[in-house]
Image (cartoon, coloured by chain):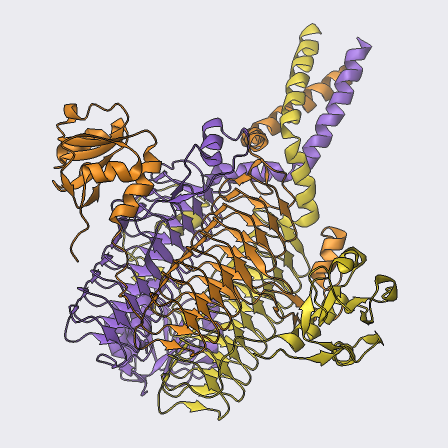
Chain colours: A orange, B yellow, C purple
Amino acid sequence: MPPLTHTIQQIADAVGATAVGDVSIQITGAAEPGDAGADQIAMAMAPKYAETLSTGSARAAMMWDGADWQGFGLEAAVLVPRPRLAMSGLTAMFDPGQGLADGIHPSAVIDPTADIAPDVAIGPFAVIGARVRIGAGCRIGPHVTIGMDAQIGRDAVIRDHVSIGARVTIGDRFRAQPGARLGADGFSYVTPETSGVEAARASLGAEGETRAQTWLRIHSLGAVTVGDDVEMGANSTVDNGTIRDTVIGSGSKLDNLVHVGHNTRVGRDCLLCGLTGVSGSVEIGNNVVLGGQTGVADNLFIGDGVITGGGTKVLSNVPAGRVMLGYPAIKMDNHVDIYKATRRLPRLMRDVEALRKAVFKSDASH
Amino acid sequence: MPPLTHTIQQIADAVGATAVGDVSIQITGAAEPGDAGADQIAMAMAPKYAETLSTGSARAAMMWDGADWQGFGLEAAVLVPRPRLAMSGLTAMFDPGQGLADGIHPSAVIDPTADIAPDVAIGPFAVIGARVRIGAGCRIGPHVTIGMDAQIGRDAVIRDHVSIGARVTIGDRFRAQPGARLGADGFSYVTPETSGVEAARASLGAEGETRAQTWLRIHSLGAVTVGDDVEMGANSTVDNGTIRDTVIGSGSKLDNLVHVGHNTRVGRDCLLCGLTGVSGSVEIGNNVVLGGQTGVADNLFIGDGVITGGGTKVLSNVPAGRVMLGYPAIKMDNHVDIYKATRRLPRLMRDVEALRKAVFKSDASH
Amino acid sequence: MPPLTHTIQQIADAVGATAVGDVSIQITGAAEPGDAGADQIAMAMAPKYAETLSTGSARAAMMWDGADWQGFGLEAAVLVPRPRLAMSGLTAMFDPGQGLADGIHPSAVIDPTADIAPDVAIGPFAVIGARVRIGAGCRIGPHVTIGMDAQIGRDAVIRDHVSIGARVTIGDRFRAQPGARLGADGFSYVTPETSGVEAARASLGAEGETRAQTWLRIHSLGAVTVGDDVEMGANSTVDNGTIRDTVIGSGSKLDNLVHVGHNTRVGRDCLLCGLTGVSGSVEIGNNVVLGGQTGVADNLFIGDGVITGGGTKVLSNVPAGRVMLGYPAIKMDNHVDIYKATRRLPRLMRDVEALRKAVFKSDASH
């Protein structure tokens, strides 16, 4: 595939930055400073990265505002005030994609009642069900299944092996990585009599008799509703709701191996990092960031703007704006105090023992 | 697809409840009270849910025993003593399924030696290996692979992209969500000399020299044996045993992204919630419930009826009937005491420091 | 499929052990002592396993060095100094595999520019992109997708439903279990202004105002580079790097549902156990073992030979050779001390309260 080519000026324009030097240099890609070839723009966004420019062959770099680009021997530079933001525009320009061909592959199995916009690309072995609607500009990879009555908005990029269950509704610009599953059945069962879990919750952990019961299935009549600009990571899963839909709000992103349970509502512009698990019937606000391997117990409320550190297990409601860490989750600054105290516990034990001896002795001497 | 229709009387009969009012009303589905249309039965299982009936258009509701259904302006009601149990029957009646067509899709690749009951449905691009046996009533979705010599009982519902490895044996009424993997190779390796892990276990964590060794693979000669009425969640995984089979007992349910390691035996009627990981060679009893993100270290024994809270990490054997929480797992009531004490640790530190000053001063004054 | 057959002598030769007794007995497989048939070799690697030999029908067993095999009524034995090591050779001999046929299945969709060695086996519905290179001896299962410009060395065994993204480079003897994903896009986003996460990191958890911002995508221009002898578990995921490749070093093994984030470098001969999550831009040394459900925060350094226990959450750099446990991770021997102290905390609280009363009283009496 011929590489995408842009000039330094075009790059600066695209990322809203300033081009300096020979702005007509043709660039075919981005590279780390030490690896960059003569046709690549070096990502030297901070002084520590710029140090390795001399070991590469870059003639141009993306650098921080005010960088002495000529001092590094460069012929041109793109100067940016917020480097990570510039990365967004730059990487979008040079993304070569996965190589999915235009048009509909003849091996795809598409129900004749499906309503697919004329410019949609569909890969080999995709299976599209009855009455599915797919908007303009969508690109659907190999081995994708889309169940009956599902709807997908414009400009989705759906990679291989993704499952979209029946009746799932998705907004515009959806992205799904390989193996993402939208619309699996909710994990919902009931025992004929009160179960051990119900008894343990009612008693806060006191043990009753162990009763042998079987689990009856509660089917999922709801599906999943997904807003605009949502992304799902590789092998992530979102389950159907029981009566109404599970909801993923616009702008929210789910990382690899994230699980969202039935009936849960995730708000707008949230990030759920790798291996995070959100149980059923949870309400998550907007702009929430859940660090990797966060867990959220069922039926909880997580307010707007909450942030959890990696591994946090949320076992009770969290008010808006809190930064949480730990298991069980507590405010991060409290956690740091408690954690420091915990590390000094063995010494504290010895101190208290010494005190006991001293006090008992002094008591005895009275 | 035309909606499934049932009368209020039929619904009550199916869930073992009492129908009252105009029991001939035709119902096409279930809805939350505030969202319900005139042809839907409102799920108003508790007073707090019934409050929103007035904002919907329901003429009939499923309600708790003794509810004043006429006072809520309804024309009919289904009165139930255990609402969650009634949900099981009701949702089964109205589940529209995933729309898999009857028969065997012509694109499926089926070994001529496979023995498939005449009424089995098999979706596009399924791959069925040599000598596979599939019982009556099974419905197998698109992109499912079933390896050679695998056996599946009656009435399975296997959604898209599921992998069933060679030699796996499954009972009746199996259900698998998209991307479930049964019969991956066990994660089992050995180093030529004693490995760092073996040394650390022997010394309980004391560090020795770091030795560079490579890992040799122990292949899985066993497979997986699955009982009746087992369900596997989306992208969940169960590995093959090394010599004998890994076992999932009848009635047990695995949620999304759950992992069960090689040689492990899960008993009957267990629930393993989302992102739970059970290592290899674990023995889990019957009626065990492992909360979301529970971890169980290898070679442990978990007794009947054990319940773990979300995030619990089980690092030692657990006797039958225990309710466990924490990392490492301890009895939930002990955990609550310890956790409360932990939160008061910074204050305790200050108290002890004050005591030390007082006692040393009083000692000095003697 | 006819079973593989080897004599006791052949088995001993293959695993580097000593054959004794009637070394010409034909063996068709391995079994646990109590289950073994007359044609199977019993795995009686330690005295406790040998006890059940009498309930099976084995004529031969694999046993520890010096075992009294005749005393157990056996006709032959393979005596091994390191049983787990012998298991590697033995299980390799008897592994019947998944039954993939030789040659390329006619349903596979293979780009004409792909360069595939003549003896490669490719299963039904595989999709191979433009300019892909696949080395001699590779076996590629059904429903595998390999993106454009990907390269795979010799003798890979890739099971069904595996995704290998565009531009991924893989060494020799790669193994992937069903649903493994190599080369998903990295989880990398940026807000136009400073985000809540950036603010919380800068302030170590102090809360600022909640700002509603949307996340802009940073595309992945890098791919994944995988060394020789790497294995990936079922539904595991490794993301593409942003500018350069994410790296998995030779000899490293990833268990089921493991996630490795963008830009991370995993060294040689590491084991990452089930449900472990490694964030982005982490540097992991050689011979590192991460126990099940370990988490590693982003931008950290993990030295050579580090071992973590199950559930460990690594929130700061770890020097070489450390054995770690807990959340946050600390040295395992410290963890054991602290954990014991934690369990005695409620009693400590009572002791301190008694001391306070005693000291205040004695103070008051002065």
Q: Quadrant of the N terminus of chain A?
A: bottom left
**Is residue B241 in view from this perspective?**
no
Instruction: Identify the residue at the far bottom of this view.
Output: B118
Labels in figure, total: 0
Residue A109, above or below C223:
below
Residue B294, above or below B139:
above
Front-most of B165 and A315? A315
**Is residue C276 in view from this perspective?**
yes
Q: Position of residue B287 (x, y in %)?
A: 65, 67
Residue C226 picture quarter:
bottom left
Front-most of B344 and B152? B152
Q: Quadrant of the C terminus of chain A?
A: top right
Instruction: Identify the residue at the far top of this view.
Output: B365
Q: Residue at x 54, y 61 (%)?
A: A224
Residue C122, above or below A349:
below
Q: Position of residue B243 (x, y in %)?
A: 41, 73
Horizontal relation, residue C300 to residue A333: left or right:
left
Horizontal relation, residue C216 to residue A333: left or right:
left
Front-most of B57 and B159? B57
Q: Position of residue C128 (x, y in %)?
A: 24, 69
Instruction: Identify the residue at the far front of this view.
Output: A118
Q: Residue at x 49, y 29 (%)?
A: C204
Residue A343, above or below A194:
above
Q: Residue at x 61, y 68 (%)?
A: A220
Front-most of C12 and A86? A86
Q: Position of residue B269 (x, y in %)?
A: 63, 70
Horizontal relation, residue B74 to residue B170: left or right:
right
Residue C365 picture quarter:
top right
